[in-house]
Image: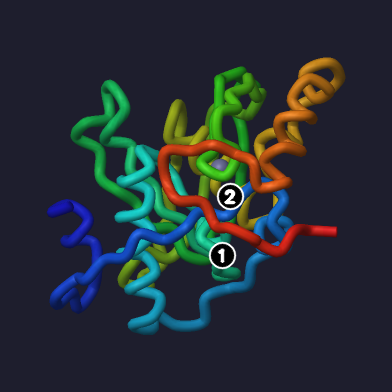
Amino acid sequence: MDKIRRLIPNRKENLMAILPIYPYDARVLREETHEVEAPTPEITQLIIDMFATMDRASGVGLAANQVGRGDSLFVIDLRPMEGYEESSPLVMINPEITDLYGEDISYEEGCLSVPNVREEVFRPEKLHIRYRDANFEPQELEADDFLARVIQHEYDHLQGIFFTDHLKGLRKRLVMPVLKKIRRGEAEADYVMAENAEMAG
Ligand code: ZN
C-alpha cells in the first residue's frame, strides 16, 4: 500500500476498513453522484477505504457509489494488470471527461458490482479528463488504452450507468437473467457485497 499511502494527504495511522460493495441496480448506483465540495477527513478516509476494498476484491477501479456513497469520485490502481505494474494509483475527484476520441474499440469488461459477468463493450480508445486529486489539486490527463477504458467505466458509474447498459440485442437478452439474480441479492462473489441494499425503482 506504499504507493497509495503517498497519495493520501495528512496520512496518520491509516486505519482501513473493507467496505461492502453495492450490487447491480442498487439505488445509489443508479442516481447521479454529487460534487465533493472540500477535501474533508471523511473523504480522505473514504479514499483509503476504497483502495483497501478494491485491493481485497482484486479490482482495478472503484467508484464511491459502489460502496454506497454519493460522492463524485473514483479510484484506479492498474498495477495488477500485465504491463501496468509500475503505474501510479489514481484518485479522481469531481472528474469531467472533456473529450473522447480515437477509434471505438471493443474490450471485455467486468465490474465488482456485477460479479461473474464479463462482456465486450465498445468505447473510444482515448480521452481527456479534468479532475481533482487526493490533495484536491486540479489535474488533467490524456489517457489511452486500458487506462482510458477503466476511467470511462468508473465515470459511467458516477452518472448511474453500468457497463451492461451498453449491451444491445442478443447479448443484452442473455445477460438479463444474471442481472436479475444479482438484483435479488443472489450474486456469489468472493468479497463482501452489501446485503439488503435499496434497489432502484
Ligand atoms: Zn464497475
Total marks in image = 2
Write down the residue under mark 2: 155
Identified at 62% across, 38% down, the residue is: 100
Q: Can you give x and y, in whole percent of width and height, for residue 7 in the image?
A: 23, 61
Image quarter of residue 110: top right
The residue nearer to you, when weighing 54 against 120, is: 54
Mark 1 surroundings within 10 Å by alpha-carbon count, few (fewer than 14), some (14 through 19), many (20 or more)? some
Disc 2 residue crowd, few under 14, some 14–19, many 20+, Cα 10 Å: many
**Residue 54 image offset from top left, x and y in percent:** 37, 48
**Residue drawn 57% across and 41% down?**
153
CB under 8 Å between discs 1 and 2 = no
Q: Quadrant of the C terminus?
A: bottom right
The residue at the far front in this view is: 186
At label 1, the amino acid type is Gly
> Residue 92: x percent and y percent?
44, 58
Q: Mark 1 points at which residue?
A: 68
Residue 117, compared with residue 154, is above or below; it is above
SS state under label 1:
loop
Across and down, in percent, residue 62 comes to: 46, 50
Q: How far apart are marks 1 and 2 (CA)?
A: 16 Å
In the picture, measured across the screen, residue 147 lies left or right of residue 11, that is: right
Query: Left or right: 176 with respect to 105?
Result: right
Q: Which of 163 and 145 is in front in this view?
A: 163
Which amino acid type is shown beneath numbered disc 2?
A: Tyr
